[in-house]
Amino acid sequence: AEGRAGHRGTYSLTTAISYPNGAPHIGHAYEAIATDAIARFHRLDGYEVLATTGTDEHGLKIQQTAARDGTTPRALVDAMSEKFRAMVAALGCRFDRFIRTTEPEHYDAARALWRRMQANGDIYLSKYVGWYSVRDEAWYGEDETEIGPDGGRRARETRTPVEWTEEENYLFRLSAYGDRLLKLYEEQPDFVGPETRRNEVASFVRSGLKDFSVSRTTFDWGVPVPDAPGHVMYVWVDALTNYLTVCGFPDESDPRRRFWPMDLHVIGKDIVRFHAVYWPAFLMSAGLPLPKRVFAHGFFLSKGEKMSKSLGNVVDPMDLVATYGADALRYFVLREAPFGGDGNYDHEAIITRINADLANDLGNLAQRSLSMIAKNGEGRVPRPGPLSEADRAMLAAADALPERAREAMKDLALHTVLAQIWAVVAEANRYFAGEEPWKLRKTDPARMETVLFVTIETVRAVAILVQPFVPEAAGRLLDLLAVPEDARMLADVGEGGRLVPGTELPAPSPVFPRFERPEAPPAA
Ligand code: ME8
């Protein structure tokens, strides 16, 4: 047999790193879940994976939140980053590294990147005068501002107040990178996805790039700029560098360097510009290879509206896990919205998904076939006889799943992978109902064994395929089928990994219980 883990090479991917100035919300959970599912899929397919996530802990917003709460930035981020770490764990995500930008290792990486950009002549000192939004930590041109209803000037796009500010700053020579960026989008059309985002970014670059300020002197909660007392790095310079830190940059001999360039950055649609314009420009300037792909997922809304404390529709991912379980939440968010589009959270919708797709379609199929085997087949994998056309068609559909899923995965179409798997589940339910194995027990027990074999062999393929999405339940289902731990890879689907007739099976128990409604759903 071919080598197992890692025989296909490496695959590295990241989430964005979250601002720990508030508790994690469903948007953060969604991004972690999707990234974890992509990571798990690649592990399952034989790649050696590096999947990372973490918290983006510097900047004025953190400093201000700490001041408001009467604490220090350090104490605030220590407490809050724990909440993000706990959420990721509660969601059943398996990240190889949780990075915090306040780690000494990260300071070294950020300073090394800075020095390389500076050595290349792309960072220079200049007086910066203009409209500054504290909330956005961004400078705006006069034409990007307007007078708000309160009479004060604000940024037109974000509606945050701006102040006339003068600062001696370091600037990054972004203006020098327009042509190279446009060439990048053209030659590597996958670099930014989905396509609508690529078009937005390309037209932004085509409209002309201005140099921008990459240091701050008005506060000190950041990575100190090398050899420039009083300057801390603009938080986005420091934040983006986290992707290099986790690969051991700047140490050339660090074994983690084999994961750079990253295969994929998974981010939300609001931060595409930072990842698809600034980040590749920084890397070009520093002479480093570029990530292969930046993919922007959509936003998760609550009952159709952006979540906000004032609207009272904030859903806490920890509450959702406690109520529905991590697997159900994972399945729901990945199935509900095409990856790249927006999704909507709704208690009714998740309950429907749990009961229809998980408990009815897949759960009942497994439970019915396995309990028939327990009752009629002495609890062993049945022995198939000659295969009918229907049997062959059923097995062919199950065996084709890995290849079809790989194809959909190339486009990061997670929802398509789930739809493909559930199409096979639906077919297996039709097959099972049509063959009526419960009647065959008396009339043709040999045929009954064949039908049960084909059914649970299909369940085996499905259970292997759903591991990235519902890892806990998939593991239990594979246990019920007595599939050894080392035979649960995509490559084990099909002829090579067939269940062995006569193998003893454990007593079946439901893997996907129905959701029984409590008196009231948790506050939404
Ligand atoms: O942007 N639905 O941090 P962040 C889906 N620190 N995704 C959402 C969302 C929603 N309602 N709200 C936010 C930052 N996100 C920076 C990133 S990376 C070097 C620095 C996504 O905590 C958002 O798009 O505001 C981003 O990808 C991630 O959650 C973290 O957002």
Image (cartoon, rainbow, N blue to C red):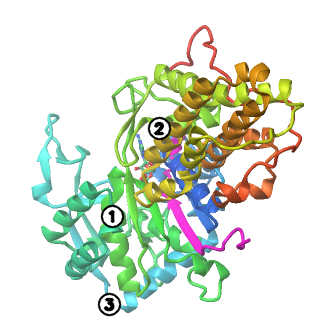
Q: Position of residue 338 (x, y in %)?
A: 39, 43
Image quadrant occupied by the N terminus: bottom right
Residue 28, magenta (yes or no): yes
Q: Can the viewer see residue 59 in this picture? A: no
Query: Which mark is on residue 121?
Result: 3
Q: Which residues are magenta?
A: 1-29
Between disc 2 and disc 3, the foreground one is: 2
Vertical side of 404 occupied by 218: above or below:
below
Name the amino acid, label 3: Gly
Q: Secondary structure at mark 3?
A: loop
Between disc 1 and disc 3, the foreground one is: 1
Q: Residue furthest left?
A: 143
Q: Earlier in the sequence, mark 2 or mark 1?
A: 1
Q: Residue at x 59, y 52 (%)?
A: 399
Query: Which mark is on residue 192?
Result: 1
Name the amino acid, label 1: Val
Residue 511, magenta (yes or no): no
* Residue holding disc 2: 335
Q: Secondary structure at mark 2?
A: helix
Q: In the image shown, does 339 or 73 lie closer to the viewer?
A: 339
Q: In the image shown, does 363 or 205 lie closer to the viewer?
A: 363
